[in-house]
Amino acid sequence: MFGSLRTQFRTYHDLKFRGTFTVPNDPLVSDREQIDMIAKEIWKVTGYRFL
């Protein structure tokens, strides 16, 4: 699935995508670290960087 998404984001300039996933709660990971990990995963798949 991620490979297909990556291809679509590289092919189309005006692509809109909405998705969700569940992240398990880990008391050893802070909220800030959790958000950072999620943002990096989105960047890996889509190439989109949050500023």
Image (spheres, rainbow, N blue to C red):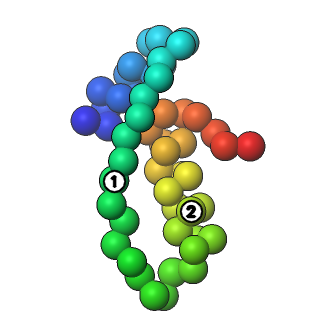
Residue found at x 35% / y 29%: 5
Residue 12, horizontal then vertical, whole percent: 47, 11
Residue found at x 52% / y 68%: 34
Q: Earlier in the sequence, mark 1 or mark 2?
A: 1
Residue found at x 52% / y 61%: 37
Secondary structure state at the residue bearing disc 1: loop
Crowd tier of the residue under label 1, counting other residues whose Cα lies within 10 Å: few below 14, some 14–19, many 20 or above: few
Q: CA distance from mark 1 to mark 2?
A: 13 Å
Q: Nearer the viewer, residue 17 or 9?
A: 17
Asked if 24 appears above or below 22 in the picture, the reply is below
Tell me the quadrant of the picture where the N terminus can be found. top left
Kindly indicate whether the residue at mark 2 contacts the one at mark 1 (C-beta within 8 angstroms). no
Crowd tier of the residue under label 2, counting other residues whose Cα lies within 10 Å: few below 14, some 14–19, many 20 or above: few
Q: Amino acid at mark 2?
A: Ile
Residue 13, horizontal then vertical, whole percent: 54, 12
Residue 47, horizontal then vertical, whole percent: 54, 33
Residue found at x 38% / y 22%: 7
In this image, 49 relative to 39: left or right?
right
Residue 14, horizontal then vertical, whole percent: 53, 13
Q: Residue furthest left?
A: 1
Q: Nearer the viewer, residue 10 or 23?
A: 23
Mark 1 — residue? Answer: 21
In this image, 29 relative to 22: left or right?
right
Mark 2 — residue? Answer: 35
Asked if 13 appears above or below 34 in the picture, the reply is above
Q: Amino acid at mark 1?
A: Phe
Q: How many marks?
A: 2
On the image, which quarter does residue 26 sit in?
bottom left
Secondary structure state at the residue bearing disc 2: helix
In this image, 47 relative to 23: left or right?
right
On the image, which quarter does residue 11 sit in?
top left
